Amino acid sequence: MASPEADVADDAPDAYVDLLDHTTTLTYLNDGAGIVYWDLQVMMPDGGMPARSKQLSALSSVAHDLQTDAAVGEDLDELTDADLTDEQAAVVREIRRGYERAVDVPGDLVEELSETQANAQQTWQRAKADSDFDAFAPTLERLRDLHRERGEHVDGDQSPYVTMYEDGAPYLPLDTVEDIFDTLREELVPLIAEIREQGDDLPAPFDGEYPDEDQMALCQAALDFLGYDRSRGRLDTAPHPFMSGTQFDARVTTRFENDPIDALMSTTHEYGHASYQLGLRQDEYGTPLGQSRSSGVHESQSRFWENHVGRTKPFWEAFAPTVNEHLGTDVDAETMYQAANRIYPENLIRVEADELTYHFHIILRSEIDRAFVEGDVGVEEIPGLWNEKMDEYLGVTPPDDARGCLQDIHWSSGFASFQNYTVGSVLAAQLNAAIREDLDVDALVREGEFDPIREWMGERVHDPGCRYETPELIERATGEPLTADYFVEYAREKFGELYGL
């Protein structure tokens, strides 16, 4: 078995060396499965699913057996009171957490869950294309039951939903996120109402039809402008934009709709995810020190680059000529800046939502998600409940399921993950406040000088990997615990100025 490139201290306990060897192999296997999943979304022909679902199921089974091997438990026991460095202790903590969350889960359940998730991807795509929730409902219900069963094996003393949430958000209590939701409800509802009632009208200059090939060329140009490392990545299209990869190969995807700003911002968002992956320590690939901290922290990077770089006036001052060149338009930078920041609650689609109403898309999903998992809502109630909450929070009702409860890919793979989008947005604003204490971000963006921004994020967010638990990482990076205050202050100032409030 191959060890990571980082040297293991000569005096490291034998159990630690064995554990590290074990976990690097597990990481390589999981990352290989990640490429297989990327291919499923991007390149696989439609007829490939019967084999692909079996392949992913087999890979998940082998990974589960490796993660729960008795030797891992023995090594962890031996290291309980061992004299370890801080980094070694962090590695053991993370491996222990993964082992304890997997060891009591039956292997056949892992296989069935993986195969069902893989098949669910295509079922969702077909159901969305046909705007037919009933075609997806049985699969969704089966996935819910399998995830609940897994959650009960992981921790039978708490709600399976909380266990599912903890999968992607280690160490950050769900109550903390609920408090953030409460703050955003209290602060954003009146701000959005004020914009609607008193705000100036902002332009929508891109109301024509723009060929996909022109939008793709524009998105490629944006990645080059931002400094995306083409030797370690690529851009493709997918039904739902995502990033997949490692510090050696971080691939991004986008999609094209009517407004090219949507594709451009989606690409910038996924670039932010890639910047995190590519910024992880290469010499620790295979260990927790070379892995991202959590879904919420990951989302902070994508939301930072999308909103605090890509939606700023300096960005459009620098990039507007490129937009006009690719789209054959003649729109000035100020108009593009305003258009990229329009508030439009009537929008139905989360990935196209503005910075303010975006969070109500997340809140309504999280509420339905939890109610469904905990059995308070039946699968057949989801479309109607979705529409009711869209009307309650945003004053708009989707005309069909494709633009309603079928728009997101997430339920085809799991539950209790939507909260991380708001965590990421809030943390992005907090990081934005901190980085502007050290760097003139606007000047750097205007000049297209992004290396200092990446280096700042690298030192504080990327380089540590999983060395620190989530709250400690956030406090080290920003100087404070996670708070929604910076996002609220940023939103009031930015949109107050934009809308003349």
Image: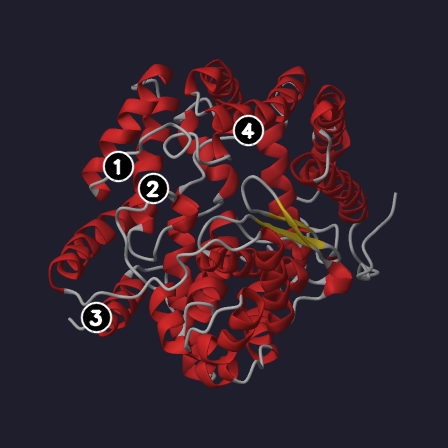
Where's residue 305, x and y in %?
50, 65
- Classify mark 4: residues with Cα within 10 Å, few (<14), some (14-19) or many (20+): many
Amino acid marked by disc 1? Met
Q: CA distance from mark 1 to mark 3?
A: 25 Å
Picture residue at 16% right of the left edge, 65% below the top: 199
Q: Quadrant of the N terminus?
A: top right
Question: 226 above or below 117?
Answer: below
- At mark 2, the secondary structure is loop
Q: Is the C-beta separation of discs 2 and 1 under 8 Å?
A: yes
Q: Nearer the viewer, residue 98 or 242?
A: 242
Amino acid marked by disc 2? Leu
302 horizontally vs 459: left or right: left
Q: CA distance from mark 1 to mark 4?
A: 22 Å
- Classify mark 1: residues with Cα within 10 Å, few (<14), some (14-19) or many (20+): many
Q: Is the C-beta separation of discs 1 and 4 under 8 Å?
A: no
Amino acid marked by disc 4? Gln
Q: Earlier in the sequence, mark 3 or mark 2?
A: 2
- At mark 3, the secondary structure is helix
368 horizontally vs 475: left or right: left
Quarter where residue 29 is shown: top right
Where's residue 474, x and y in %?
45, 62
Mark 3 lies on residue:
496
Residue 125 is labelled as 4
Mark 2 lies on residue:
348
Mark closer to the observer (2, 1): 2
